[in-house]
Image (cartoon, rainbow, N blue to C red):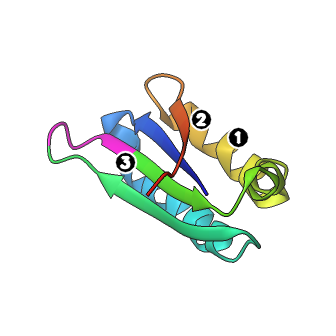
Amino acid sequence: MLCTYAKCLVKPQNIQAFLTLANTLVDASRLEPGNVSYELCQAPEPDNCFAFVEKWKDQQAVALHLNSEHFNVLIQRISPLLEREMEITTMEVIL
């Protein structure tokens, strides 16, 4: 199983727009084959720091996700709302 952590630092004036798009991304991604879980988290400080925390069955499921239409459309809409590019880390779940 793979776990992906995608950290997003959102421009403060864009938080509401980000949340709307992020919720759509979460809902659609949870329906994908091979998705184990897909969560959006918010840091208490600074409150414009968010992270998508995802678990996938295998690399094939991740590849399908990254090539899905909803992912690509929503990431294109989310990217301009961010202060900088997302920081993405993928790890293998061992326990």
Question: Label 1 belongs to which residue?
Answer: 76
Q: Which mark is residue 15?
A: 3
Q: Magenta stretch: residue 24 in it?
A: no
**Residue 3 badge:** none
Q: Position of residue 63 (x, y in %)?
A: 81, 49
57 above or below 3? below
Q: Over which residues does the magenta segment extend?
A: 45-50
Q: Residue at x 43, y 25 (%)?
A: 83
Precedes in sequence: disc 3 or disc 1: 3
Would residue 5 appear left or right of 64 to someone viewing this image? left
Measured Cα–Cα span from mark 2 to mark 1: 6 Å
Q: Element type at marker 3?
A: helix
- The local secondary structure at tag 1 comes to helix
Mark earlier in primary sequence (2, 3): 3
Question: In what quadrant of the picture does the N terminus appear?
Answer: bottom right
Amino acid type at image mark 3: Ile
Q: Is residue 49 magenta?
A: yes
The amino acid on which the numbered mark 1 sits, given as a three-letter code, is Gln
Furthest residue toward top: 84
Residue at 83% x, 56% y is 64
Q: Which residue is mark 2?
A: 79
How would you rate the neighbour count of disc 3 (Cα within 10 Å): few for under 14, some for 14-19, many for 20 or more? some
